């Protein structure tokens, strides 16, 4: 992990009060932790969309297994994307409904493609995607991203 940098943030009083309430509700120990989580989430979403970094996540699906065509299509799509699928877990929710969790890891581009394909299957409900950065992408390479910092920019209270 690279060193911590302090920087100042100016916020409207009203917004800060709402944010402090959010922090309390989410049981964050500090504002810094809450802000860093929000920034990380935004950066990960962007990296995911651009598809130029390795990401990991889980796709959650709910469907009726009596729809044979749906089940066949679902299997076919997963085999098309086997290179980014780590594993899948199938849970029988009741007599009709199945919950499937597909764990994915790899380049964001094919993973986004997989999710798009899954959403096109008729009859599938609740295709949701949860994602995170892998260890290699936890600390973005700022030099590579063209970000050049001057020491005075990192001073607190600005
Ligand atoms: Ni089932």
Image (tube, rainbow, N blue to C red):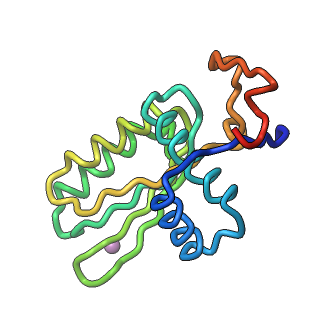
Image quadrant for the N terminus? top right
| Residue in the foreground of this view, choosing between 137 and 105 | 137
Q: Is residue 84 above or below residue 25?
A: above
Dividing the picture into quadrants, the one containing residue 50 is: top left
| Residue in the foreground of this view, choosing between 129 and 99 | 129
| Percent position of residue 35, x then y | 61, 53
**Ligand 1: which quarter?**
bottom left
| Residue in the foreground of this view, choosing between 121 and 151 | 151
Dividing the picture into quadrants, the one containing residue 115 is: top left
Q: Is residue 95 above or below residue 135?
A: below
Left or right: where 67 falls relative to 81: left
Name the residue: 15% across, 59% down: 123
| Residue in the foreground of this view, choosing between 148 and 129 | 148
Image quadrant for the C terminus? top right
Name the residue: 53% across, 54% down: 87
| Percent position of residue 30, x then y | 70, 64
| Percent position of residue 69, x then y | 16, 55
| Percent position of residue 110, x then y | 43, 33
Name the residue: 48% across, 29% down: 51
Q: Is residue 17 above or below residue 158?
A: below
Left or right: where 122 falls relative to 50: left
């Amino acid at each position: 992990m690279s060193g911590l940098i302090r920087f100042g943030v100016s916020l409207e009083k009203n917004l800060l009060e709402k944010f402090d309430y959010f922090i309390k509700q989410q049981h964050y120990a500090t504002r810094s932790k809450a802000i860093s989580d929000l920034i990380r989430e935004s950066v990960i979403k962007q990296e995911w969309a651009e598809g130029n970094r390795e990401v990991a996540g889980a796709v959650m699906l709910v469907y009726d297994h009596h729809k044979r065509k749906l089940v066949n299509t679902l299997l076919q799509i997963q085999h098309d994307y086997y290179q980014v699928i780590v594993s899948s877990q199938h849970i029988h929710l009741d007599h009709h409904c199945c919950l499937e969790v597909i764990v994915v890891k790899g380049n964001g581009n094919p993973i986004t493609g997989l999710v798009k394909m899954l959403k096109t299957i008729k009859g599938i409900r609740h295709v949701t995607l949860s994602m995170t950065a892998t260890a290699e992408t936890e600390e973005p390479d700022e030099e590579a991203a063209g970000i050049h910092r001057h020491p005075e920019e990192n001073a607190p209270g600005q």
